[in-house]
Amino acid sequence: MRFSTGAAFVFLASALTTVLAETFVVTVGKNASLLFEPTSVTAKVGDVIAFQFMSKNHTVTQSTFDNPCAVKADGVDSGYQFIPQGTNVFPQWSITVNNDTAPLWFFCNQKPHCERGMVFAVNPTAEKTFEKFNANALASAPPATTAAPAATTSAAPTGTSAPDTGAANAAAGALSSPAGSGAMSRASISGWPVVLASVIIGALAL
Ligand SMILES: *[C@@H]1O[C@H](CO)[C@@H](O)[C@H](O)[C@H]1NC(C)=O
Ligand SMILES: *[C@@H]1O[C@H](CO)[C@@H](O)[C@H](O)[C@H]1NC(C)=O
Ligand SMILES: *[C@@H]1O[C@H](CO)[C@@H](O)[C@H](O)[C@H]1NC(C)=O
Ligand SMILES: [Cu+2]
């Protein structure tokens, strides 16, 4: 019997990728801060970045290097995650990197967190550093004082907003919730975070 070495190779390669994949946990608003921690990670194809929402009402929303605080049209978005004070239930939302040569840029879409530096990067480069991205975010601060609440951008402030799987976003997977509902579930196992959704992203235009 002949084996398909090609198929076997693909199988082995994907099995290996799974085995070697790492998961990075990134806290969102830890200790009531307006910060992602760490502020950036260097991830390989297959690695998972699990965002853990720790306070307030933040989002993880994809943007671009040049416009850190603007929703990327075909990007991914956790939606707003409200964390009641005093809880020890910290929901989690994750993405899987499928192209590690394309940096990915994120911000919190709760005004005015991004303009205060609540931004995050995956695989920043020597040219497009996290520091420059962060500086872009701070520079996009609107004039203080009585600005009307900024018009909501395209992301609907609902629990989970499904990413647009079309266009330039090569392999955006469907959002999936283990609870089986589109809304977030707060059930948890003794403080371990709920996995809200998983999105595969990559090949994202810069
Ligand atoms: C959390 O923030 C409070 C108030 O700013 C500070 O006193 C405390 O040290 C912080 N805790 C940690 C673990 O960062
Ligand atoms: C979270 O923030 C969004 C946007 O400001 C808002 O529409 C939503 O009502 C907030 N959720 C809660 C539970 O406060
Ligand atoms: C990964 O991203 C780079 C940089 O944007 C792009 O040139 C390349 O085609 C992408 N690779 C795949 C497999 O999509
Ligand atoms: Cu925020």
Image: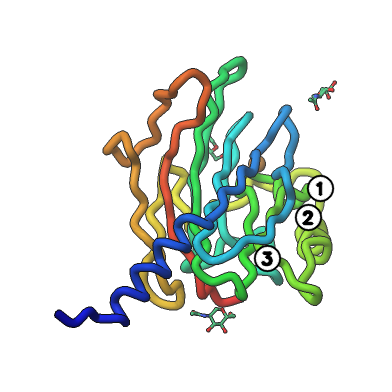
Q: Locate the N terminus by quadrant.
A: bottom left
Q: Is residue 101 visible?
A: yes
Please say if the residues under marks 3 and 1 sit with CB atoms less than 8 Å apart.
no
Horizontal side of residue 7 vs 37, given as left or right: left
Q: Is mark 3 within 8 Å of ligand 3?
A: no
Q: Residue at x 50, y 61 (%)?
A: 46
Foreground: 63 or 15? Answer: 15
Residue highlighted by disc 3: 123
Q: Badge 3: few (under 14), some or many (20 or more) residues near its Cα, within 10 Å?
A: many
The count of marks equals 3
C-alpha separation, residue under disc 1 versus residue under disc 2: 8 Å
Residue highlighted by disc 2: 141
Foreground: 166 or 94? Answer: 94
Element at badge 1? loop
As displayed, is residue 76 above or below residue 25? below
Q: Position of residue 165 (x, y in %)?
A: 37, 67
As displayed, is residue 138 above or below residue 149? below
Residue highlighted by disc 1: 144
Please say if the residues under marks 1 and 2 sit with CB atoms less than 8 Å apart.
yes
Q: Residue furthest front?
A: 1
As displayed, is residue 114 above or below residue 166? above
Amino acid of disc 1: Ala
- Residue depth check, mark 1 versus mark 2: number of the one nearer the observer: 2
Q: Residue at x 61, y 48 (%)?
A: 24
Q: Residue furthest top?
A: 86
Amino acid of disc 3: Asn
Element at badge 3? loop
- Residue depth check, mark 3 versus mark 1: number of the one nearer the observer: 3
As displayed, is residue 79 above or below residue 5? above
Amino acid of disc 2: Ala
